[in-house]
Image (tube, rainbow, N blue to C red):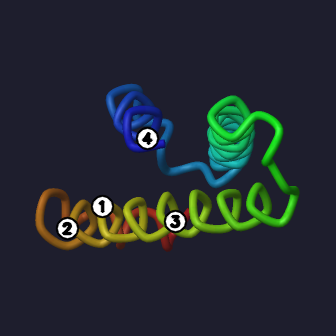
Amino acid sequence: MIVYFLLLSTLDLHLYPVFSFVNLIICGIVIFLAILELKKLQKESFRYQFGFGVGLMTGFTATVIFTIFSLLYGTEFRPEFSQRFSTQ
């Protein structure tokens, strides 16, 4: 998600919230791959409750990391971003 955001930033498209929808797709694919990896590792002992937990933790972790990045980006690296984004 961070790489995608920085790519949008180079094209000056990060100001449009409609492109944030792709973050949902990226996050969904990563959660799916994490659950698939858990299922491969556990084989017969795989339980869907564990898969659900891995999905929640993966999504939570990605959200926290992206939020911290967004905070740093908007306050430290490009402070004008917050003002430009809020006026769009």
Location of residue 9 by image quarter: top left
Between marks 1 and 2, how big is the CA–CA gap? 13 Å
Q: Mark 4–mark 1 contact, CB under 8 Å?
A: yes
Residue 85 horizontal side relative to residue 29, left or right: left
Q: Which of the two marks, 3 or 2, is nearer to us in this view?
A: 3
Q: Mark 4–mark 3 contact, CB under 8 Å?
A: no
- Mark 3: which amino acid? Thr
Q: Quick one: 40 or 28, which is closer to the camera?
A: 40
Asked if residue 19 can be seen in this view, the reply is: no
Q: Which residue is mark 3?
A: 63
Q: Residues within 10 Å of mark 2 (few under 14, many from 20)?
A: few
Q: Residues within 10 Å of mark 1 (few under 14, many from 20)?
A: few
Residue 8 horizontal side relative to residue 30, left or right: left
- Mark 1: which amino acid? Phe
- Mark 2: which amino acid? Pro
Between marks 4 and 1, how big is the CA–CA gap? 10 Å
